[in-house]
Amino acid sequence: MNEPGQCRYDVKSTANFDEMEFDFGARNLFLYNHSQFFSMPDIASLGLPGYDPNRRADFNLNVRCIDSRGNGKDAKEYIINFCVKPGEDKSPPIITGREPVNEFVKFDALSIDAAVFTNEPAECKWSLYSNKKYDEMEKSFECANDIEDRESLLGWKCDTTFDINKIDNVFYIKCKDQPWNAGNESKRNEMSNPYEFRIKKTANPLVIDYVKPNNETLIFGVGPATVILEIKTSGGIDGRATCSIFGSNMGETFGTIHKQLFNRIIAGDYEFPIMCEDIAGNVAEATSKFRVELDSDSPIITRVYKQGGDLVIITNEDGECSFVRDRNEGEACNFAFENGTLMSGYEKIHSTDFYVSKYYIKCKDKWEHVSGDCSIVVKGEEYMYEA
C-alpha cells in the first residue's frame, strides 16, 4: 500500500469496513504490507459435491483498508478471486491466525490466554527455543481438531496460556496434521519451521497527562454555553488510546489528544468521569470537574478617584467604559455606549482627562452587557481625592 493501513476481509460483501469480520493477516496494526494465510473451503461447500478430480469452483475474498484517520471505511471492496480444486494433502499444516491479534499486552500482564488457528485439523506444541523439533517441544496446545470443529475461514483452533516474563516474549510453535493418524507418524505432515508467536509487554503504563477544564470556574455571558473537554494521554504503547465519557467514545479520540464538545451547558457544577484504553489493554482514568457561571450583568464601578489630571475608575470585571459630559440632567444617561467618548484601558482600570464638569459614564463587559442607565455620574472635583 502507499501508506500504513489496517485491513479486513470477509467472504461476503459488506456495506463498510466495520461490518467486515476478519483482520487481514490476523493483525489490526497499521502496516504497509499485509499477508494472510487461510483455510480454503472444501469443494463440496462451494456447491460441487462428488469426487471428480477435475472439479473447479470460484471463491472470493472481499478486502477493505483504512488509514490512521479512518479514510476508506466506505470504499468499494477489493476482490481477491481464487479457483478451488481438490488435491491430496502432502503439506504440513499452516498457522493461519492467532489470538490475540494484537502483539502488545498491558503493562502489568503476567500471563495471557492465547490461541492459534490451523488450516487443517492438527496438534500443536510450543517451546521457548526455536531449534526444537515437534516431539521435543515442552508444552502442548489444547486443540479442537475434529472435522466439525472448524471455525470460519481461519480453520481449527488450538488454545494455551503463555507466561509473560519480559518485555519482548517469543514462543515458537510447530503443528502436525492428521491427528487421526496418531501412532502412524509416517503419514502425518509436520511443520519444519516454527511459527513465532510474539508478545510485547508495554514498557510503561498509560497515563492521562492533563484534563481541561479541571477544578476551574468558567464564566459565560450567555447560556447555554459551549465547553470543549480536552485530555492528553502518554505512555502505554505509543501514547495513543481511545477515551470515553460515561462509556461513550469522545468525539475526537484514538490519538494522544482527545476532545469532546458540549454545546448545551447551563450554569452549575459538572463532573465527567473519563476512561482511556490503548490496544494493549492499558487503562487510565481521570475526572473533569468544573463550574459554569453565567454573567448577565453589566460591570459595576467599585472605585473612583483622581490621579494627577486624570479621572480613574475601577470596575469589578474586565470591560470598556465610555462617557459624555455636561448634558441635560434628564437625558444625560440615555446616550448609546458607542456614541460616548471611550475611556483608556480595557480590563478593570479606565481613565480619561478630568475637568471641572459632570461625567456620565457607562461600562460594558466582554459579553456586551451594558447598563441602560449610567454606571456612575461623577459631579466634578468636589467629590474626588488624589490617589
Image: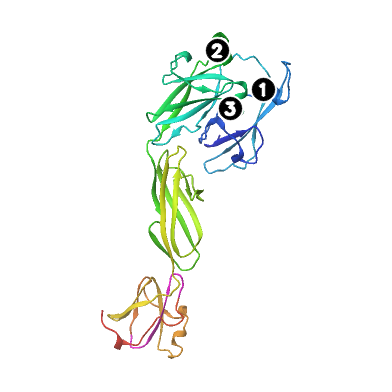
Q: Residue 23: x percent and y percent?
A: 56, 33
Front one among 150 and 252 = 150
Mark 1: few, some, or many residues within 10 Å (few <14, many ≥20)? some
Residue 82 in which image quadrant: top right
Say few, some or many: other residues with alpha carbon within 10 Å of mark 2 (under 14 / 14 to 19 / 20 or more): few
Instruction: Judge by depth and name the residue closer to the eye, 86 or 334.
Output: 86
Q: CA separation, marks 2 and 1?
A: 23 Å
Q: Please state which amino acid type lies under the numbered disc 2.
A: Ala
Q: Earlier in the sequence, mark 3 or mark 2?
A: 3
Question: Could you say which disc has been placed on residue 256 in the image?
Answer: none
Q: Which residues are magenta?
A: 355-369
Labelled disc at residue 182: 2
**Residue that appears at 67% across and 22% down:** 42
Q: Decide if residue 20 is on the left or right side of residue 349.
A: right
Considering the image in quadrants, where does the N terminus appear?
A: top right
Q: Secondary structure at mark 1?
A: loop
- Quadrant in which the C terminus is drawn: bottom left
Q: Based on the picture, tell me whether residue 336 belongs to the magenta stretch.
A: no
Residue at 56 percent of width and 23 percent of height: 144
Where in the figure is residue 183, as x and y percent of width and height? Answer: 54, 10
Location of residue 163 with respect to 309 vertically, above or below: above
Task: Name the side, left or right, on which 63 lies relative to 217.
Answer: right
Which residue has dot 3 on it? 154
